Image (cartoon, grey):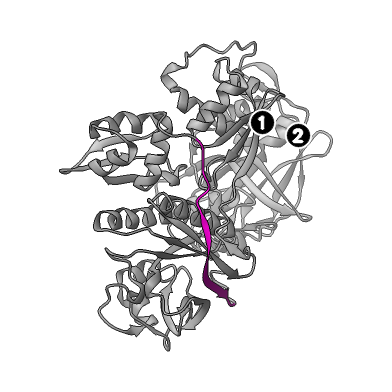
Amino acid sequence: MPVLRFRAERLARLVGLDDPSDLEEVAFKLKGEAEWGEEGYVYIELNPDRPDMYIGEGFARAARGLLGLAAGYQRPETVESGVEVRAGRVASRPYVAAAVVYNVNVDGEYLEELIQFQEKLHDTIGRRRRKAAIGLHDLAKLPDRRVEYVEVNIREAEMEPLHGGGRVSVAEVLEGTEQGQRYGRLALAGERHPALVAGGEIIAVPPVINSDVTRVEPGTRDLFIDVTGTDPRAVLSTLEVLVAGLAERPGARVGLVRLEAPGMPGRTPAMESRVHRLSAAWASRLLGVELGPGELARLLERARHNARPLDSGEVEVEVPPYRVDVLGPIDLVEDAAMMMGYDSLQPRLPQLRTRGGLMGLTLLAREFKKLAVGLGFTQVMQMVLVSPRVVEALGLQGAVEVANPVQAEYSVLRPSLAASLVMVAAENQHAEKPVRVFEVGEVVWREAGSVYEELRAGLAVLDESVSFEDVQAPLYSILRILGVRFTARRAGAPWAIPGRFAVLEMEGGERLGWIGEVHPEVLERLGIEYPLALAEVSLSAIASGEGRFRIRGRATRSP
């Protein structure tokens, strides 16, 4: 949850409150929580779905509607700025958008909030600058009104980093500054990195740092804003929220920037509203309060939308561009509830005529676990992600690879519980023997162009001496107690000793699972020094085949 730091007197003045202590109640009604900090400051924790409130003017805009001091949305005045942004090919961070806001009139107090606004947007919509990052520039210091977004060679290109004290190469910025060390790898592609260039001067290397050439400071009147990223929606949403917050400054105007960039509109910011229709009867049913279209429209006007009741019993709602959290009618119902006050809604028990219950597959998994524990096995619980090295050593087919794994050691989804159980055996091979473990979990595999997932149960026995029967006997006992009818036939597997592997099939020929002893060569590749036997059955097949199994002496049908 983002926590914002505001000067209490400034925020109260923006909202229209005589007493700053009233901010606590206002924040609470806006799904926030206020705490008083050091002298003159208030900390407000807000939901991450309301980035438009991350600056004083944005919070005040919402608060004034809640208090009935303002209503509706008025699109800010827009003018042509004469600024152009042209994008070349920037593979690592291909999207860029820009805007100008006039008459922001930055002072020391506002600059503090502006930087906070920028960083909170980075952390939320921008996903810590991965999806979108913001650059703020003093328009008057812009070397040229034609800005290029290109890749530069980090060893050859030079810039003056913000508060850096001198001209250095981009490589030195990435390697020698705190910002560079934190974000320098996000967009770096070999020796090349994205940069914004105006008049031959690098004004930013997004998403890392701006240049000192266009530094924003107290006395800055007009702002040029750039947003770059890997997601066009995140880039445009970030720009809309930021510009809308700045446009709340007295006398502010929004300057449109001509944009020549792949996948982006020709001018930004668009500042276009979205229109939804909301049924008053449906909203009333959800809230448990009778609301006519007119009354619902007035509540939504207080939430700073534009709303118009229709003869059909619906309300036509114009949603401001900065409300990126509004995805559909249900979000508008929530806004109406906030304006009414949650404390005015009377809770009541739902009139349900149905009773919940556990699915048959869940009951089956629980029963398998109880029986396995009763037979002397210890349960293990592991991630679905496993090492590709283990999957390759076992010769397992159909493994699904993760496109951008956090760790290379865990980069594929296990197509069999065997991949997890042999890892447990390897890690515990020097423990007291026998090592008898089991797992109930999901497996994922690819077959004939489709990806499948099911719940399976697996057993593993590791000891000084292990045979096929060490897992066969307990598995057969469990299946018979569950009332599962099956047959076994000899087969082979890449990882098993020839003649020591069998496939289990249910009535009708549906595959149920397998039992086998791991080949010594496979054990050696995995670093396992003792014999190991494995078994695996599909609980999904048991639950969905005939749909019948026995739990605690009664027959059960899977829903």
**On screen, residue 56 above or below 239:** above
Q: Looking at the image, which is closer to me, 442 or 349? A: 349
The disc label shown at residue 129, or none: none
Structural crowding at the residue carrying mark 2, measured as other residues with C-alpha within 10 Å and reported as few (<14), some (14–19) or many (≥20): some
Single out the residue that lies furthest toward the right.
Answer: 508
Q: Is 214 situated left or right of 312 in this image?
A: left
Expressed as whole percent of the image width and height from the top left, the position of residue 5 reads 28, 46
Looking at the image, is mark 2 or mark 1 earlier in the sequence? 1
The quadrant of the picture occupied by the N terminus is: top left
Q: Is residue 159 above or below residue 286?
A: below
**Magenta-highlighted residues:** 72-88
Quickly name the residue at label 1.
479
Residue 469 showing in the rendered view: no
Q: Amino acid at mark 2?
A: Phe
Q: How many marks?
A: 2
Q: Amino acid at mark 1?
A: Leu
Q: Quadrant of residue 489?
A: top right
| Nearer-the-camera pick, 462 or 545 | 545
Provide residue 133's location: percent of width, then percent of height: 45, 62
Callout 1: 10 Å neighbours few (<14), some, many (20+)?
Answer: some
For marks 2 and 1, give the CA distance. 9 Å
Residue 479 appears in view = yes
Pointer 2 with pointer 1, Cβ within 8 A: yes
Question: Residue 356: image x %, image y %?
Answer: 60, 18
At a point 67% along the width and 44% down the height, the residue shown is 453
Q: Which residue is mark 2?
A: 486
